Structures are given as structure tokens and as C-alpha cells.
Image (cartoon, rainbow, N blue to C red):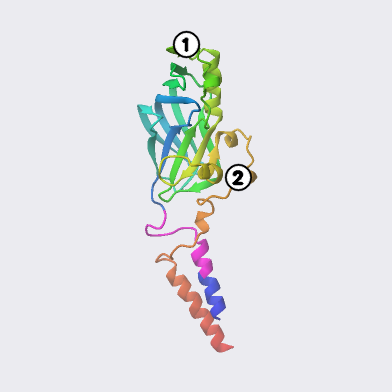
Amino acid sequence: MMRSVLSLGCLLVACSPEWGGTSVGNPGKMTSTIGEPEGVSLMIAEAFVKEVVLEDCEGGTTIQAVDNLVDLVAGFNVVVLDEELCGAELVIEPLLYFYGEDDLGQIFNLYLDPQDDFLVESWSGVAIDGTQLIFEMGEPGWLNTESLALTGVDDVIMETDPRAVALSERITEDVALFEDDGDGVVSAEEREQSKVGSAAYARGEEDESDRPHVSGEDAKCATVPLNNGLWPVFFAGIFLMCRRRSRA
């Protein structure tokens, strides 16, 4: 009988569809930032973000208006209220502006006009319970000395320049979503193990079977305390088992 009681208890604890109290449902945070350049120092990376669109795993969307010029070097944050996140998009108005210098001290001004969306989709859905996420635009090294091909002091690369066109494509192709430990930086370990969504997956170019299992997956079937509504069911099951055992 004890084994049966424990089995029932574990089933209720592990796979109840909804939980009470504060065990889940705490808002999360998504920090949007730019991928680390290579051989280049960025002092300014600015974009006018109109809104952030968050998609839950039931097909619903939440639109958060921003309507502001944001700093993509420091990153900017939005609150994630949905219990599960399956997609995110930054709606950015042109132009994106970058100011920096290369390792030789050559200054540059770069203007980008991306034609594609800054959009990611998750292959499994991310359970949100105080979860920290990073929305990274452009993978590390997307901006480098080779892609800039600076020709002299105070280079100004306008959005129609072939270099700017190529960089505009690259920054939108390599967008990814990561679970973060809260420091606002994608570590090497997080890049390897905590990637939960990408633009490549949204385009159908990335196979979900190749992705690692992360902490947010299967969170609705995790061990958490029973809420008040489930305890009566649990004890009723114990009572019925005891009666059946006494009659045997």
C-alpha cells in the first residue's frame, strides 16, 4: 500500500497542470543586446525600437511599446509576463547607428538598414518563472575588421554601401535567444548549453533535435509543492487505498 500511496503522491506533485502560490508565474526579464565584435571596439550602438512582440506558446502575443532610442551596447530590458515564451521580435525603425574604432585606432561611423525582422522562435518553449533571457542580435564576431574594411581615418559607411548591406543581412540572420544566469552576458557555457531560440529556427534552418535540453523545458512537469487544491485529492486517494486494503 505504501508504494501505491507514494506513486500517487509523486504523480500529483510531478505532473499537475497548474500550480498555486508563488512557485511559478514570476515575471521574467529579456535583455536585448548586440553580439560582441571582433577586433573592433564599439562605443555607441543605437537603434530606435518601436515595440517588442512576445509570443506565448498558445499563439497569443503581447506587444510592449518602447518608442525610444535604445543603447544596444549596454542592452535594454523588457518584462516577460507570459508563463511560457515561444517567440520574440524587436520591431526596429531604420537606421541602426554604430560608432567605434578598430585595433589600429581607425574611427568609423556605420549605418545599417536591415530588411529582415529581428525575430526568434523557440523549439521547445521557455517556462517563465523569474527567468532571465538575452536576445542577442548578431553572433560574436559579426562585426570585425575584415567586414568593415576601413580605408582611413573617420570612415563613414552609409547604409547603401555594400559593406553595410552585408552587415545588415548578417545581424538579422544570426539572432538568438539564451537563458542567462542574470549577469546580462552570454558566457561560453551558456552559448553552448542555454540557447533556447533563434532566427535560424524561425526560418526552418535549424533542427530542434540538435539543441541541448535546458532548465526551462518540461517545467510544467517538475517537482514542486502541492497547492491547496490538490491536497484533498491526495488524501482521498490514500483513504480509498486504506479501505481497499482493510477489506482484502
Which badge, 1 or 2, comes first in the chain's sequence? 1
From this view, report whether residue 25 is shown above or below residue 192. Answer: below
- The answer to which of 98 and 220 lies nearer the viewer is 98
**Which three-letter amino acid code belongs to the residue tagged 1?**
Gly
Give the residues in magenta. 10-24
Residue placed at 59% from the left, 88% from the top? 248
From this view, report whether residue 245 is shown above or below residue 189. Answer: below
Instruction: Work out how far the residue at label 1 is from the one at label 2, CA to CA, in angstroms.
Output: 43 Å
- The answer to which of 71 and 21 lies nearer the viewer is 71
From this view, report whether residue 117 is shown above or below residue 134. Answer: above
Left or right of 29 in this view: 121:
right
Left or right of 236 in this view: 213:
right
Residue 32 counted in the magenta span: no
Give the residue pinned by disc 2: 211
Residue 169 spot, x, y in % from top left: 55, 23
Q: Is residue 94 shown to the viewer in this render?
A: no
* Between marks 1 and 2 in the image, the one whose residue lies nearer the viewer: 1
Give the residue pinned by disc 1: 152
Residue at the limit of the structure toward the left, as seen here: 68
Task: Look at the image and tell me in which quarter the N terminus lies.
Answer: bottom right
Residue 95 spot, x, y in % from top left: 43, 19
Secondary structure of the magenta portion, mostly?
Answer: loop
